[in-house]
């Protein structure tokens, strides 16, 4: 960081970091959506308890 400040590259590095932050946020949102959709698709209506009942035949 000292090298960036010494050579006056603060503005450029701030823009680069901000762009990387936006991309990381988008990736996190997409990943969370995929996980949520997958869990919703695989879980039965009763959740884990409903799954146990259907396996045991209760």
Image (cartoon, helix red, strand yellow):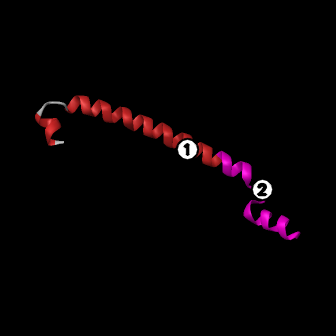
Question: Magenta span: helix, strand or loop, mainly?
Answer: helix
Q: Residue drawn at (76%, 66%), measured in percent from left and top?
A: 49
Q: Residue at x 79, y 67 (%)?
A: 52
| Image point (78%, 56%), residue name | 44
Left or right of 18? Residue 6 is left
The relative height of residue 47 versus residue 25 in the rendered view (above or below) is: below
Compared across the picture, whether 39 is left or right of 16 comes to right
Position of 7 relative to 55 (above/below) = above
Circle 2 packing at 10 Å, graded few (<14), some (14-19), many (20+), is few
Circle number at residue 18: none
How many dots with numbers? Answer: 2
**Residue identifier under label 1:** 31
Image coordinates for residue 18, horizontal then vertical, percent: 34, 34
User: Residue at position x 44%, y 35% from top?
Assistant: 23
Instruction: Give the quarter of the image for residue 24.
Output: top left
> Which of the image's four quarters has the N terminus?
top left
Within 10 Å of disc 1 (Cα), the crowding (few <14, some 14-19, many 20+) is few
Kindly give the residue lying farthest to the right in the view shown.
57
Quarter of the rendering occupied by the C terminus: bottom right
Direction from residue 13 to residue 32 in the image, left or right: right
Distance from disc 2 to disc 1, alpha carbons, whole Å, reads 22 Å
Q: Quadrant of residue 33?
A: top right
Give yes or no for contact between labels 2 and 1 (Cβ–Cβ under 8 Å): no
Residue 46 x, y percent position in the rendering: 78, 60
Q: Position of residue 56 (x, y in %)?
A: 85, 71
SS at mark 2 in the image: loop
* Residue 54 coordinates in the image, percent (x, y): 84, 64
For numbered disc 1, what is the local secondary structure?
Answer: helix
Q: Which residue is mark 2?
A: 44
* Disc on the earlier residue, 2 or 1: 1
Q: Which residues are magenta?
A: 37-58
């Amino acid at each position: 960081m000292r090298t960036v400040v010494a050579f006056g590259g603060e503005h450029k590095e701030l823009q680069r970091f901000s762009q990387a932050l936006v991309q990381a946020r988008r990736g996190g949102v997409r990943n969370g959506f995929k996980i949520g959709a997958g869990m919703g698709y695989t879980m039965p209506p009763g959740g884990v308890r409903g799954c146990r009942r259907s396996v045991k035949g209760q």
